[in-house]
């Protein structure tokens, strides 16, 4: 009789542990996927580094031709059109304006300072594009 009660309790404990583990796994996956944007066939990583050094990573799925087009479509960047292309002032909801605070959003491609603007940079699958406050 005592052995049966112990087995019931152990079985209940095992069920609780398995359930809790599956819930944690599901929550972790939901958090990881929360920074996935878009639904296209080409995927790249987009990194935002704010003035305090905080980093936010996004997985972007797109069919857009340029990085700028993809990020604009997802509402991740905004700015002003100029004769040189898009002057990005807002990234991930954070506005930085050189004329106001002496800082700007620097654009990087695979860790290197970009030699092209975001709106003239073609999307390359697997690449990492970053905006960083400088």
Image (spheres, helix red, strand yellow):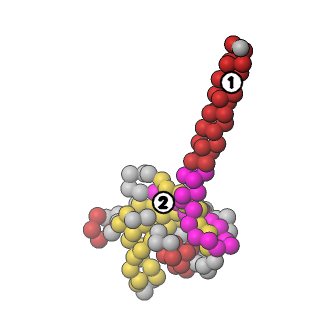
Residue 48's disc number: 2
Q: CA distance from mark 2 to mark 1?
A: 51 Å
Instruction: Of the two numbered discs 2 and 1 on the same chain, state the one appearing first in sequence.
Output: 1
Which residue: 52% across, 63% down? 130
Give, as a single range, the part of the protein colored magenta.
28-49
Residue placed at 59% from the left, 42% from the top? 24
Pointer 1: what residue? 8
Was residue 9 drawn as part of the magenta stretch in this picture? no
Q: How many marks?
A: 2
Q: For this view, does 76 lie left or right of residue 16? A: left
Q: Secondary structure at mark 2?
A: strand
- Residue 8 in percent (x, y) is at 68, 24
Q: Position of residue 104 (x, y in %)?
A: 38, 66
Classify 1 as above or below 116: above
Residue 14 at x, y = what percent? 67, 30
Q: Is residue 24 visible?
A: yes
Q: Residues within 10 Å of mark 1 (few under 14, many from 20)?
A: few
Q: Which residue shows up at 57% across the image and 62% down it?
A: 36
| Res 129 visible | no
Badge 2 crowding class, 10 Å Cα cut-off, few under 14, some 14 to 19, many 20 or more, is: many
Instruction: Find the residue positioned furthest to the top.
Output: 2
Quarter of the image with the N terminus in it: top right
Q: Nearer the viewer, mark 2 or mark 1?
A: 1
**Residue under the point 60% across and 43% down:** 23
Q: Looking at the image, which residue sits at the far front?
A: 1
Q: Tell me if 42 is positioned left or right of 92 in this view.
A: right
Residue 113 horizontal/vertical position (percent)? 53, 65
Q: Is residue 107 above or below residue 122?
A: above
Q: Quadrant of residue 61?
A: bottom right
Lateral position of residue 28 relative to residue 77, left or right: right
Task: Report if residue 41 lies within the magenta region.
Answer: yes
């Amino acid at each position: 009789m005592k052995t049966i009660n112990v087995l019931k309790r152990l079985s209940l404990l095992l069920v609780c542990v398995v359930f809790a583990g599956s819930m944690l796994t599901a929550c972790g996956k939901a958090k990881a996927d929360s920074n996935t944007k878009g639904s296209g066939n080409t995927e790249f990583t987009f990194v935002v580094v704010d003035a305090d050094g905080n980093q936010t990573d996004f997985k972007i799925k797109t069919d857009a031709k340029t990085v700028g087009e993809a990020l604009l479509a997802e509402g991740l960047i905004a700015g002003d059109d100029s004769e040189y292309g898009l002057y990005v002032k807002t990234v991930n909801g954070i506005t930085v304006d050189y004329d106001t605070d002496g800082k700007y959003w620097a654009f990087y491609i695979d860790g290197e300072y970009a030699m092209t603007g975001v709106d003239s940079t073609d999307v390359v699958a697997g690449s990492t594009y970053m905006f960083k406050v400088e």
